[in-house]
Amino acid sequence: MLSAYFLISVTIISLCALLWSRRKYYILMFKLPGKIGYPLLGNALQISRRDDMLNMLKEKETEYGGLFLSWIGPFPIAVVSEPQLAQDVLNSPNCVNKSFVYKGVEDATGRGLFTLDDPEWSYHRKLLNPAFSHKILLSFIPIFNKEVDNLIKVFETIQNSNVDLATILQNFTLSIATQTTMGQIMSDKGVDSGVDESLLQAFPYVQETIVEMGTLSWLSMKVLVWILGDYEKYKKAKATIRKFIGNLILERTKIISEKSKLDGNIFINRAIELLQQGNFTHKNVEDESIVIVFGAFETTATTLKHIITLLAMHPEYQDRAFEEISSLLPRKEHFEMSYSDIQQLSYISMIIDETMRVMSTVPVVGRQVIADTKLSNGVVLPKGLQVLIDIFNMQRREDIWGPEARSFNPDNFLPSNIEGKHPYSYIPFTKGLRNCIGSKYAILSLKIAVAKLVRNFRFTTDFEYGNLQYVENITIKLKQTPLIKIEKREM
């Protein structure tokens, strides 16, 4: 009997201690609007499908404003869609660490730049920054030109039929990524030779599983595996990616060992140099390589597909892009774009920006508060709180972008229209202390690809812009993929 009383007493004391340790969260509940979540589940039941997440966030932001409180399981999460508050969070040294919702990403890719906590993240970022310097990026321009030319050859074989460009564009960007970051040419034939089918299937499958893990991220990995089911397929997909990256590292190591000096300072050369100096372990090199290649190829392929899709839906803007590149490089079917040429692509730059505004490649980002942090509106975010920045809906706010904020219109990025807008009202690569290391790389490759493709082809589709439905998937995904018709332009 005494032992029963003791057990009850210990339970009550433990529960009280737990509640006391979370008191700042409960105080925040009375300061911020939002709905209290269910025990263990949080607000998960409000989202019946992942397809609904971005719409649900929009509804809640309309109801509660640019800062409200939600729950991931038993943990509170502040949802931000106000540019000034996003700036507060992204520039705070207390909010550099990624949210635990990225637990699945770390399980899939290892501990690289995407998921590392500070100060280890700052250390790695400082060491790897030279691999993305302006000089190094300029050295990639011949590779970008060559691979787009290979892509043009592929497009010429699929003219006048409605096609899903996803796999073709993934093949194209993976070929670029392996050359520019790992120093390896995948095939002498370029993108039309095809990449191992299992590899191209592995990346999206791992990504899908990561997102599912994110919705249950407060649970242990063993519980997640049990809930999600087919772990063997996920493990096999991870192994396929890691084997691919491992082989690239091995090949590059052989090449470097035969040279007295590293040729250039591309990512893999820099990473191996850090390994030789004792700053990186072999696991660091492998994990960072997976993160860099995944980021360089997957996000660029997604964005390029969206640009082509939106131009196909809006022929008037496609025509203006064609006029710009034609005036710059008249009567040239095959041409090399220089950095000087790229700098003159003002309208194509606006098209890229507008695409990433209405279809933000990374729709939401998460941070974790490591010390009490006061925002500019006076609200204090307590230590341990998760913060979700809703980039997708923030970039479509009518009070910022006007009554047609959800429409696609590159003129939104005319200097006269962008002037006066909050600098954090458009953050496709995030901003602040932990901005994307590859943002300039992505823009450079996209400008060359869009210019050369529009110069050679006209894109059309029967799918209407108003019927697009968006799914949060780390990088944004369309519920139904529009098929694109490609027609060769007469030169």
Image (cartoon, rainbow, N blue to C red):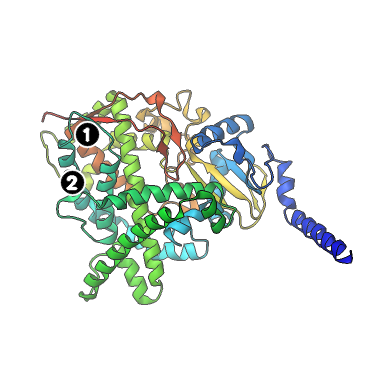
Of mark 2 and mark 1, the one earlier in the sequence is 2
Residue 193: image location, x then y, percent: 18, 49
Q: Which amino acid is tagged 1?
A: Val
Q: Quadrant of residue 464?
A: top left
Label total for image: 2
Looking at the image, residue 279 lies above or below residue 289: below
The residue where tag 2 is placed is 192
Quarter of the C terminus within the rendering? top left
Q: Is residue 451 left or right of residue 271?
A: left
- Are discs 2 and 1 less than 8 Å apart at CB? no
Residue occupied by mark 1: 454
Amino acid at circle 2: Asp
Determine whether, in the image, residue 385 is placed left or right of residue 7.
left
**Pointer 1 local density, CA inside 10 Å: few below 14, some 14–19, many at least 20:** many
Q: Which numbered disc, 2 or 1, marks the residue closer to the eye?
A: 2
Confirm whether residue 99 shows in the render: no
Q: Residues within 10 Å of mark 2 (few under 14, many from 20)?
A: some
Q: Residue at x 39, y 62 (%)?
A: 288
Q: Nearer the viewer, residue 458 or 243?
A: 243
In the image, is residue 34 above or below residue 244? above
